């Protein structure tokens, strides 16, 4: 039996919830790392261009597909492009399922580092302790990994259990302002550090001679991945938009806030790094190295007011992760409700429990557990976690995103998409003809380029 569909109570609620979905470890973890790897300046400029030309048009496409149908990803794509396109929606739901199963493990690490940083703030940072050894010890502890992952899973299920307006939107209205407040506090502190000027120059001064060729593809790929596109999350959130709410305004605000937060997080992290003599040459050679190895020690040994900023920073990471895990679970829950007729309570708990089984596999893949730690499906990827991440990031999200652009640009009629976007509430900066050009030609070619790059060996995981 069909159930009454919940809706966001306002455009602000939609923007906060969807921004929360987009803001995650990609902003606080991956973007600073790939900016560092690609020498800043020119890479950031290319990334901003890609966000405007690819990310924003696809964001609008996913939201309009969802609002038009008022259904989850499977039903929405069936209605938009035909019955066979339900397979693309199902592919997106599966992507959300797998992604959440291992993303929860990383999210759990933020809880561990928050607890550790509180202890260091009150008891002092242990002399001679290696942050790298601490990280290796905690990820190798099977019981600890399962406990952290379970805690984050329960928190995620609890929010989605209460639905869209009473659960997801309510949490977004509380957590997003807190997240913004912590970011502003950290930013003000970072700008007062000795290395802030060097950090700002590194991030915003164009240096095209130092931009690696593969950096352009990296910028393009991240402009797509950072907005939670390609797996039906924004289609699902779009299905809860009422006719009184503007898709264009919401999409613009979501993309702008997501991009701003990624840039602010990068300024904060680089200001810390450049303020410590020699640290710019010693930053860990991975996203893990920057966030969980280099920064914890710096907060307590080099950064002014680090005893306050350290715990705040990992609260920020945890909040960003939670708002993302909520949206991933909602993708699966909404599918179960719409396609299988379960109540929200049963669908949420059932989906959450099923996903957690695979979370166990991901958590144990760091602990030396036979098979899970040695599994190698993709060349150079060892362990369940790494292979799942590689499959989702390199294959599932780009292929799902490509077909969504085709559905919106080529399968849906001009009159249908125009009526969804030009609803009388659209802002002056929006031009439908430009959007249609980008969604029909620029975005599909760009996402296809990502897929071709993956085939030729580029790794976006």
Image (cartoon, grey):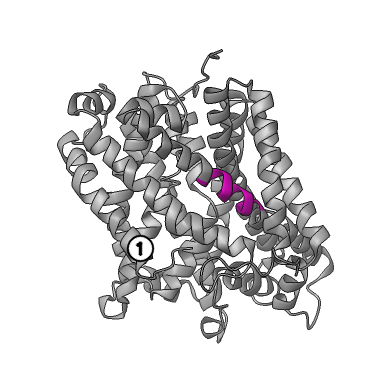
Q: Position of residue 45 (x, y in %)?
A: 30, 63
Q: Relative to residue 265, is residue 271 depicted above or below?
A: below
- Compared across the picture, whether 237 is left or right of 349 comes to left
x and y, in percent, of residue 88 in the image: 40, 39
Quadrant (top left, top right, bottom left, bottom right) of the N terminus: top right
Magenta region, residue range: 95-104
Q: Residue at x 43, y 50 (%)?
A: 397
Q: Nearer the viewer, residue 407 or 275?
A: 407
Q: In screen coordinates, is 460 left or right of 385? A: left
- Residue 200 % position (x, y): 41, 69
Tell me, yes or no, whether the highlighted magenta stretch contains residue 345. no
Secondary structure state at the residue bearing disc 1: helix
Question: Which residue is tagged 1?
Answer: 219
- The percent position of residue 399, horizontal first and vertical second, equals 38, 50
- For the question of whether residue 162 can be seen, the reply is yes
Residue at 21 percent of width and 40 percent of height? 435
Going 24% across and 23% down the picture, which residue do you hit?
419
Please, what is the dominant secondary structure of the magenta stretch?
helix
Magenta-colored stretch includes residue 101: yes
Residue at the location (65% across, 51% down)? 104
Q: Is residue 260 visible?
A: no
């Amino acid at each position: 039996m069909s159930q009454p569909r919940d809706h966001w109570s306002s455009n602000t609620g939609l923007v906060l919830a969807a921004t929360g979905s987009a803001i995650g470890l990609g902003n606080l973890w991956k973007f600073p790392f790939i900016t560092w790897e690609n020498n800043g300046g020119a890479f950031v400029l290319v990334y901003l261009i890609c966000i405007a030309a690819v990310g924003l048009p696809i964001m609008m496409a996913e939201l309009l597909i969802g609002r038009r149908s008022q259904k989850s990803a499977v039903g929405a794509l069936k209605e938009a492009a035909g019955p066979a396109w339900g397979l693309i929606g199902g592919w997106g739901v599966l992507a959300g399922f797998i992604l959440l199963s291992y993303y929860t493990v990383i999210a759990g690490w933020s809880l561990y580092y928050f607890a550790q940083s509180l202890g260091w703030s009150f008891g002092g940072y242990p002399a001679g302790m290696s942050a790298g050894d601490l990280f290796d010890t905690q990820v190798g502890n099977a019981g600890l990994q399962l406990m952290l992952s379970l805690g984050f899973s329960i928190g995620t299920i609890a929010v989605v259990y209460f639905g869209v307006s009473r659960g997801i939107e309510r949490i977004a209205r509380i957590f997003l302002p807190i997240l913004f407040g912590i970011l502003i506090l950290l930013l003000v502190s970072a700008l007062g550090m000795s290395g802030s000027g060097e950090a700002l120059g590194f991030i915003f001064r164009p240096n095209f001679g130092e931009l690696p060729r593969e950096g352009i593809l990296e910028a393009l790929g991240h402009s797509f991945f950072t907005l939670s596109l390609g797996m039906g999350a924004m289609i699902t959130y779009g299905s809860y938009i009422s006719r009184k709410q503007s898709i264009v305004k919401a999409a613009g605000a979501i993309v702008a806030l997501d991009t701003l937060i990624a840039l602010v997080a990068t300024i904060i992290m680089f200001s810390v790094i450049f303020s410590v003599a020699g640290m710019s040459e010693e930053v860990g050679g991975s996203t893990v190295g920057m966030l969980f190895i280099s920064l914890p020690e710096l907060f307590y040994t080099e950064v002014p007011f680090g005893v306050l900023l350290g715990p705040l920073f990992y609260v920020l990471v945890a909040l960003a992760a939670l708002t993302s895990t909520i949206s991933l679970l909602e993708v699966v829950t909404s599918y179960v409700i719409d396609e299988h007729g379960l109540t929200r309570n049963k669908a949420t708990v059932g989906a959450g429990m099923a996903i957690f089984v695979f979370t166990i596999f991901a958590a144990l893949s760091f602990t030396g557990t036979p098979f899970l730690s040695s599994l190698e499906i993709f060349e150079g990827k060892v362990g369940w976690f790494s292979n799942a991440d590689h499959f989702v990031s390199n294959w599932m999200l780009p292929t799902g995103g490509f077909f969504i652009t085709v559905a919106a640009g080529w399968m849906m009629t001009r009159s249908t998409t125009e009526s969804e976007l030009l609803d009388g509430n659209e802002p002056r900066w929006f031009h439908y003809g430009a959007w249609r050009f980008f969604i029909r030609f620029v975005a599909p070619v760009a996402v296809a380029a990502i897929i071709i790059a993956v085939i030729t060996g580029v790794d976006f995981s």
